[in-house]
Image: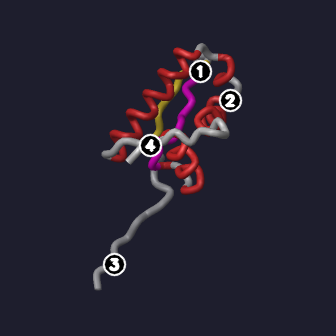
Protein backbone atom coordinates (compact mmCIF):
# COMPACT_ATOMS: atom_id res chain seq x y z
CA UNK A 1 0.00 0.00 0.00
CA UNK A 2 1.37 3.37 -1.02
CA UNK A 3 1.13 6.13 1.58
CA UNK A 4 0.95 9.71 0.37
CA UNK A 5 2.24 12.49 2.58
CA UNK A 6 0.57 15.86 2.95
CA UNK A 7 2.56 18.55 4.72
CA UNK A 8 0.50 21.21 6.48
CA UNK A 9 1.77 24.58 7.57
CA UNK A 10 3.58 25.36 4.33
CA UNK A 11 3.79 28.90 2.99
CA UNK A 12 0.32 30.40 2.95
CA UNK A 13 -0.99 31.71 -0.38
CA UNK A 14 -2.41 35.20 0.14
CA UNK A 15 -3.69 38.28 -1.63
CA UNK A 16 -1.79 41.41 -0.64
CA UNK A 17 -4.09 44.38 0.00
CA UNK A 18 -2.55 47.82 0.50
CA UNK A 19 -4.33 49.63 3.33
CA UNK A 20 -3.04 53.00 4.46
CA UNK A 21 0.35 52.36 2.91
CA UNK A 22 0.78 48.94 4.56
CA UNK A 23 0.32 45.65 2.76
CA UNK A 24 -2.01 43.29 4.58
CA UNK A 25 -2.01 39.63 3.59
CA UNK A 26 -5.44 37.98 3.23
CA UNK A 27 -5.23 34.19 2.89
CA UNK A 28 -6.82 32.63 -0.17
CA UNK A 29 -9.80 30.31 0.17
CA UNK A 30 -7.74 27.10 0.12
CA UNK A 31 -5.62 28.38 3.00
CA UNK A 32 -8.51 28.90 5.43
CA UNK A 33 -9.27 26.62 8.36
CA UNK A 34 -12.16 24.27 7.47
CA UNK A 35 -14.71 26.08 9.68
CA UNK A 36 -13.92 29.43 8.13
CA UNK A 37 -13.81 27.86 4.65
CA UNK A 38 -17.39 26.59 5.07
CA UNK A 39 -18.64 29.98 6.34
CA UNK A 40 -17.05 31.95 3.51
CA UNK A 41 -18.14 29.42 0.86
CA UNK A 42 -21.73 29.62 2.15
CA UNK A 43 -21.56 33.42 2.01
CA UNK A 44 -20.42 33.36 -1.62
CA UNK A 45 -23.26 30.95 -2.38
CA UNK A 46 -25.79 33.58 -1.29
CA UNK A 47 -26.14 32.53 2.35
CA UNK A 48 -24.54 35.69 3.80
CA UNK A 49 -27.13 36.17 6.53
CA UNK A 50 -24.56 37.04 9.20
CA UNK A 51 -22.36 39.33 7.09
CA UNK A 52 -19.73 36.60 6.75
CA UNK A 53 -17.96 38.29 3.85
CA UNK A 54 -17.58 41.58 5.73
CA UNK A 55 -16.56 39.68 8.85
CA UNK A 56 -13.97 37.63 6.99
CA UNK A 57 -12.27 40.70 5.49
CA UNK A 58 -12.60 42.63 8.77
CA UNK A 59 -10.53 39.86 10.41
CA UNK A 60 -7.56 40.83 8.24
CA UNK A 61 -8.22 44.46 7.26
CA UNK A 62 -9.77 45.64 10.52
CA UNK A 63 -11.83 48.82 10.61
CA UNK A 64 -10.65 49.71 7.11
CA UNK A 65 -13.49 47.48 5.84
CA UNK A 66 -16.05 49.86 7.33
CA UNK A 67 -14.20 53.02 6.29
CA UNK A 68 -13.37 52.23 2.65
CA UNK A 69 -15.62 53.17 -0.25
CA UNK A 70 -17.96 50.43 -1.44
CA UNK A 71 -16.20 50.43 -4.83
CA UNK A 72 -12.85 49.76 -3.12
CA UNK A 73 -14.35 46.98 -1.01
CA UNK A 74 -15.79 45.34 -4.11
CA UNK A 75 -12.39 45.55 -5.83
CA UNK A 76 -10.77 43.80 -2.86
CA UNK A 77 -13.46 41.10 -2.72
CA UNK A 78 -13.32 40.49 -6.48
CA UNK A 79 -9.51 40.34 -6.53
CA UNK A 80 -9.51 37.88 -3.61
CA UNK A 81 -12.25 35.81 -5.22
CA UNK A 82 -10.41 35.68 -8.57
CA UNK A 83 -7.11 34.71 -6.91
CA UNK A 84 -8.87 32.04 -4.80
CA UNK A 85 -10.69 30.60 -7.81
CA UNK A 86 -7.46 30.46 -9.80
CA UNK A 87 -5.75 28.70 -6.90
CA UNK A 88 -8.62 26.19 -6.48
CA UNK A 89 -9.23 25.66 -10.17
CA UNK A 90 -12.96 26.16 -9.60
CA UNK A 91 -15.39 28.94 -8.75
CA UNK A 92 -16.30 29.53 -5.11
CA UNK A 93 -19.82 28.29 -5.79
CA UNK A 94 -18.63 24.87 -6.98
Q: Which residue is mark 3?
A: 3
User: Is 61 or 91 nearer to us in this picture?
Assistant: 91
**Residue occupying the point 59% across, 21% down:** 19
State which tag comes first along the sequence, 3 or 4. Answer: 3
Reply yes or no: does residue 41 show up in magenta.
no
Q: CA distance from mark 4 to mark 1?
A: 19 Å
Decide: marks 1, 3 in contact (CB < 8 A)? no
Name the residue located 38 percent from the left edge and 33 percent from the top edge. Answer: 82
Between the residue at mark 3 and the residue at mark 4, the CA separation in whole angstroms equals 26 Å
Q: Which mark is residue 54?
A: none
Q: Residue 70's image quarter? A: top right
Marks 2/1: CA–CA distance: 10 Å
Task: Kindly identify the residue that appears in the image at 52 percent across and 39 percent down.
Answer: 46
Q: Are marks 2 and 1 in contact (CB under 8 Å)?
A: yes
| Residue with the mark numbered 1 | 19
Residue 62 lies in what quarter of the image? top right
SS at circle 4: loop
Q: In this rendering, which labeled residue sits more in front, label 2 or label 1?
A: 2
| Residue 10 percent coordinates (x, y) | 46, 54
Mark 1 element type: strand
Residue 42 horizontal side relative to residue 62, left or right: left
Q: Assign a secondary structure to mark 3.
A: loop
Q: Nearer the viewer, mark 4 or mark 2?
A: 2
Residue 80 percent location from the top left of the image: 46, 32
Residue 29 coordinates in the image, percent (x, y): 47, 45
Residue 39 lies, in percent from the top left, at 58, 48
Magenta region = 22-30
Q: Is residue 37 above or below residue 67?
A: below
| Residue position marked by numbered label 2 in the rendering | 62
Give neighbour class at mark 3: few <14, some 14-19, many 20+ (Cα, 10 Å).
few
Amino acid sequence: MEVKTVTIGEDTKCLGVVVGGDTVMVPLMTELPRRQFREVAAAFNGEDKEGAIDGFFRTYLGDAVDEMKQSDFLRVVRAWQAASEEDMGATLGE
